[in-house]
Amino acid sequence: MALVPYDDRDGWIWWNGGFVPWREARLHVLSHGLHYASAVFEGERAYSGNIFKLREHTERLIASGRILGFEIPWSAEQIDAACQETLARNGLTDAYVRPIAWRGAEEMGVAAQNTKVHMAIAVWEWGAYFGVEQRMKGVRLAMAPWRRPDPRTAPTASKAAGLYMIGTLSKHAAMDQGYDDALMLDWKGDVAEATGANIFFNFGGELHTPTPICFLDGITRRTVMGLARQHQVKVVERTITEAEIGQASEVFLAGTAAEVTPVREIAGHSFTPGRLTETLMRDYEALVRLPPEEVARRAA
């Protein structure tokens, strides 16, 4: 993350329906979400006071909880309002927004039917994920030592905390080698995504991206695909093999935090960010600054 939301700071966090001072937002050490990863979250960005595609993020949060077997005890309307209120309470307009829901400490063990579901929302200032200068010249990706799991072995359609453990391990390994991030393959050995963002390739003027069968079909991912189609660029979702990586003329990442970030290297394969990447970066930056009603109209 570009900025660490450390615990000793001023501010307010929405906590189970009300606000608590940032320093007082605490959970019990025996919370089920801490021990057994029964937690789901979202990453959202606010631009000029508007949280981009807020309802889509909220609906995914609720759906992720259901995939993990629990119901978040607030409606989508209530969660949307809480996110906006948290942004306003902290006096921020351009910020990162992190809602999270988890099982509490009422029961300790693998089974957790008797736990209470808690929820919190924090916001903080956050600029470009990799830093503006670094982002413009492109980031370098190593190959991750871990693979995205078979969807029959993990709830890969959810944005669940436990699924990010291998992302953390893979990014740490990449950074130890001097890279910025890592490209993760799927359980079959085909291209999946980076540790926290989806990936796109320019093959012959067409925009290709892996089919999201074992990782999230990202909200930014779908947004970028829509922007490409507006320019009559053919978008192809398919299996992309590791051997094909070097054939791409351009590569970029897309995600709420990363936005549209060019890639200049993947494990020895070099790329030069070109017109397609620059166009989609510019279009995305313009789109996120529009009022929510205009974003919805363009998506219709």
Image (cartoon, rainbow, N blue to C red):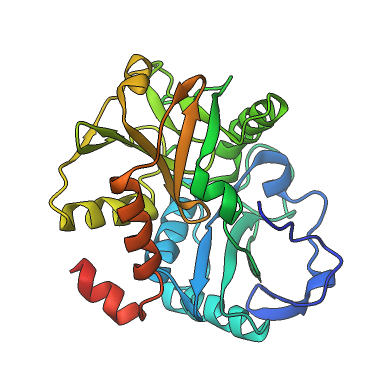
Q: Is 92 rendered above or below residue 149?
A: below
The residue at 63%/64% (across/down) is 126
The location of residue 250, given as percent across then percent down, is 34, 35
The location of residue 43, given as percent across then percent down, is 53, 58
Residue lying furthest left in this view? 232
- Say how many tags the image has: 0
Q: Is 89 rendered above or below residue 71?
A: below
The residue at 19%/37% (across/down) is 206
What quarter of the picture does the C terminus occupy? bottom left
Q: Is 207 rendered above or below residue 75?
A: above
- The answer, for residue 177, to whether it is visible in the render is yes
Foreground of the two, 240 or 19:
240
Is 100 situated left or right of 208 in this image? right
The residue at 72%/46% (across/down) is 34
- The answer, for residue 129, to whether it is visible in the render is no
Is 224 situated left or right of 257 in this image? left
The location of residue 116, given as percent across then percent down, is 64, 60
Q: Is 263 rendered above or below residue 85?
A: above
* Quarter occupied by residue 17: bottom right
The location of residue 52, given as percent across then percent down, is 42, 69
Residue lying furthest right in this view? 8
The residue at 59%/59% (across/down) is 101
